[in-house]
Image (cartoon, rainbow, N blue to C red):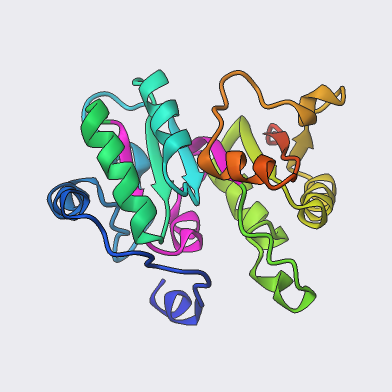
Amino acid sequence: MGGEQQRRVLFGRRRGRPLRPERRRLKAELLPRLAVTLPACGPLVPQALFAGAPRPIWLEIGFGGGEHLAFQAAQHPEIGFIGCEVFENGIARLIAQIARQRLDNIRIFSDDARLLIASLPPCSIDRVFILFPDPWPKRRHWKRRLITRENLDRLAAAMTDRAELRLATDDRGYLVWMLQHLSEHPDFEWLARRPCDWRERPADWPMTRYEEKARAAGRTPVFLRAERRPRSG
């Protein structure tokens, strides 16, 4: 893990505007309790991050301001949620929602999500959300995109049979990229059967601030659902 971590290059911002005093206080008080720390050796056991009986685990990669993650956690108190985000302002926004709604089923990984994915044991994740990841539209930056064969391989290994992968984008170029990588991957099946299956956001998928901005700018979001095919044998 150490050598791999040294080779990783993390793209994107870590900080924006200075945090307001209240959010800075909440982050200092709550993040140490909510933070996911990867083990020095061996896999991470996601269920061990939560008190009580073992529970299904859902993972959101790049949760932005945390609106979707907080909504899902409030709707599903029986599920354990791990959210990955490196942007400090988004982390602070989510922590404020956790405090306000008294959510106890969210944990936060504030480093490169690829490190966490690589540390997950097989069949440990029951749903994955990757909503509006950075499209990196310039060709020379495509290698930075989160949806790659390597990352799909690792997600497929970590996901349980018939676990769901949810993707969203408002970038047409990245949409083509996502569909190509999903259709070429032997472990995932795209679940769309009708146009509304990707044009309309499912009822249990709340609108986020990013989606609102995309629509206001005239960009049309697309919502993809794929299933992890059952393992043979």
For this rendering, which residue is in front, 126 or 83?
83
Instruction: Using residue 45 as the reference point, say whether residue 177 is left or right of it.
Output: right
Image spot of residue 52 (x, y percent): 22, 25
Q: Residue at x 45, y 64 (%)?
A: 112
Q: Quadrant of the N terminus?
A: bottom left
- Estimate the x, y position of residue 80 in percent, counting from the top left: 36, 32
Note whether 24 is above or below 99 in the view shown.
below
Q: Is residue 110 above or below residue 82?
A: below
Toward which corner of the image does residue 197 lie, by quadrant? top right
- Residue 109 appears in view: no
In the picture, the quarter occupied by the C terminus is top right
- Residue plotted at (46% across, 69% down): 13
Residue 159 is situated, as x and y percent measured from the top left of the image, at 56, 40
Left or right placement of residue 133 versus residue 24 in this view: right
* Figure check: 53 above or below 61: above
Q: Which residue is drawn at 35% across and 56% down?
A: 89
Q: Which of 113 and 187 is in front in this view?
A: 113
Left or right, residue 213 beside residue 69: right
Dividing the picture into quadrants, the one containing residue 38 is bottom left
Is-magenta flag for residue 191? no
Disc tally is 0
Residue 148 in view in this figure: yes
Q: Where is residue 121 in the image (x, y as percent from the top left)?
A: 46, 48
| Side (left or right) of 129 relative to 188 | left
* Between 105 and 131, the one nearer to me in the picture: 131
Q: Say which residue appears at 66% left-offset and 54% top-offset.
A: 153
Answer whether residue 114 is magenta in the image: yes
Region in magenta: 105-131
